[in-house]
Amino acid sequence: MAENTVISAPKEKEEWFGKKERKLLTDPFNDNNPITVQILGVCSALAVTTQVYPSVVMAIAVTFVTAFSNLATSAVRSYIPKEVRMIAQLVIIALLVTIVELFLKAFNYAIWKQLSVFIGLIITNCIVMGRLEAFAMANKPWRSFLDGIGNGLGYGAVLILVSVVREITGKGSLFAGSPIEWKIIGNTSAYMINTTAEGSWFGWYANNNLMVLPTSALLLIGIIIWIQRSYNKKLVDIS
Amino acid sequence: MKKALLHFFERIEPDKKKSPLLHTAYDAFFTFAFTPKTVTTDGVHIRDGIDLKRTMVYVVLALQLCYLFGAYNIGYQHFHAIGQYPGLLDGLHLKLVYGLIKILPIFIVTHVVGLGIEFYYASRKGHGVEEGFLVTGALIPLLMPPDIPMWILAFAVAFAVIIGKEAFGGTGMNIVNIALLARVFVFFAYPTYIAGDEVWVSGLEKVNGVYQTAAYGGVYQFFDGIFNAWGWDTFGAGGAAVIDAYTGATPLALGYQGGWEKIVATYSVSDMWWGFIPGSIGETSKPLIILGALFLIGTGIASWRIMVAGVFGVAFTGLLFNAWGMTPFMEVPWYYHFYMGSFLFAIVFMATDPVTASSTNRGKWIYGFFIGVIGLVIRVMNPAYPEGWMLAILLLNVFAPLIDHYILEGNMKRRARRAKAAAQ
């Protein structure tokens, strides 16, 4: 009978790095950004974005954790019993976060101190857990790995955007604490634009203290969301 | 005459499709001058001669006395600091002109920035400019210290209008008071310009550790020329040193240091009452604020419930602090808290904003009372924030919808119970 005949679809050739895979990497930058669209991981975005350098380190750390936890979870996804999958995922994440933390402690103690508890808190970062639940538990390892990298970088992009604005307007510097520190505007001669210099055009300038407070990160993320939705009509939900 | 003017206005009306921005601007000024012809026809509405613009103009009118005294007080404080013209009416022309030179740029910058943003968004959205900025623009200069740099002011106004109002959907949709949002922006972003002992008296600069008046610039020289021609006193060159032991501290700062004795050692009670003390431009004179309050209550614009509840809140907390008496500032008699700082200004002009305040009658009592309580707690207990009304009002603005919600729920429950009892 016709109903019983199973027409086996011609097996699609698995592409190593095709259109779908590229989409996994680029989507999190705009259409599916973890912070501005999924609204995940906002808490750490408020806390670490005072300066650019810690944000970059944080972005790399989160990308590392999401990518490899996605990979590992996806690899063992059919062996995890449904009832204990959260715990199993957490063990994987905790392992990776511990690696990151020990690595930073050993090679860059200053930045570890600055990021302090937030490195440990990557465990609870919703992006990691969210991608495991939403993607890695249902997809193959290689694609999960790409999804992890994409989401980590999408998170990092917003982080760096916010921190650049916050550091320039709040402290007058860029990449402070890193080997390539730029001092842009301030009231000593160490800065490129010295506001106290004789005949300076910028004698009126003052740093914006609001930008040092976490509130400003929330405002900036809100403004980014506003701008993003005003040109990307796909994201506007009419409900 | 009026008809001819109306006819003229109708003739110059720009085409709405061809130039939306021009039409928006035209519409704003036209409806400001004349009541528009269009009326609501459908739905249940109260049809009344008073509309949003007429309502807001009443508030602006109520603020005029504060403006006048604010301009005078800027000059008075300036000359008081250097010990010139000690009498209230001595050198009146100098004090007024000095104050006006300070206050006019603040007023103009506020309106250019605020109205510019308002016009832009109105033409973008394709509706008329609701004169929402009229009251905000009149309030913001009164909340600022006289020496506020213009670029900070422009930033603050832009921030408040864009983030506080346009992001939420324009006039009447804002959650927190826009004028206070502008002030809170300056307060957190540039604290050295709006807090401390040095900002409330204008035109002073520190040279070798001693305060002296800054040099009077071109505008003052221009007025000096006029005064010279009439044989009046002139500003001179500037550089006069301040009087001995001058600090510029406000009564609140002094109260925190040494309680009531320290306050009255510098400022007399009548000075504080009439407003001859340093402070934000519009907040100092209590009788003029009360006059404005009576005007607003009389015309039915502002809610007397919020004002009375606020006064109760301050009195209650003041009495509580008097009984506690842990720090010298807590021992300040509770009724003197009305003399210092900006409580009256805040509760009359800020807390009663109909958009952000509670809208149920019982909600207004709760809203006003807690503004009084929280504001005074911040004033007395927290040395980092010398005055608490700004933060208290913003906090209660956020809570106002919640208060209203529970008042309505309670009302519904009571009526349901009553209906049930009647049915039985």
Image (tube, helix red, strand yellow):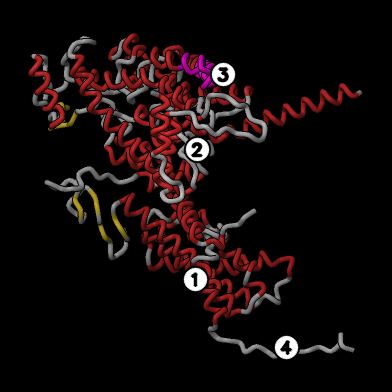
Is B158 situated left or right of B193 in this image? right
Q: Position of residue A101 (x, y in %)?
A: 47, 65
Chain assignment, label 3 = B
Identify which amino acid the numbered label 3 is placed on: Arg
Which residue position is annotated with label 1?
A: A64
What whole-number distance in Å separates the C-alpha atoms at marks 3 and 4? Answer: 75 Å
Cα distance between the residues tagged 4 and 2: 59 Å
**Do the residues at pointers 3 and 4 share their chain?**
no
- Residue beneath the point at 17% across and 48% down: A201
Question: How would you rate the neighbour count of disc 2 (Cα within 10 Å): few for under 14, some for 14-19, many for 20 or more?
Answer: some
Quarter of the image with the N terminus of chain B in it: top left
B299 in the magenta segment: yes
- Count the marks: how many? 4
Do the residues bearing badges 4 and 2 touch, measured as CB atoms within 8 Å?
Answer: no
SS state under label 3: helix
Magenta residues span B293-317
- Which dot, 4 or 1, sits closer to the camera? 4
Please report contact status of discs 4 and 1: CB closer than 8 Å, yes or no: no
The answer for which chain carries disc 1 is: A
Residue at the disc numbered 2: B171
Residue at 56 percent across and 69 percent down: it is: A95
Quarter assignment of residue B362: top right
Locate residue A149 relative to residue B190 in the image: left or right.
right
Kindly identify which chain the residue marked by label 2 belongs to. B
Q: Nearer the viewer, residue B213 or B297?
A: B297
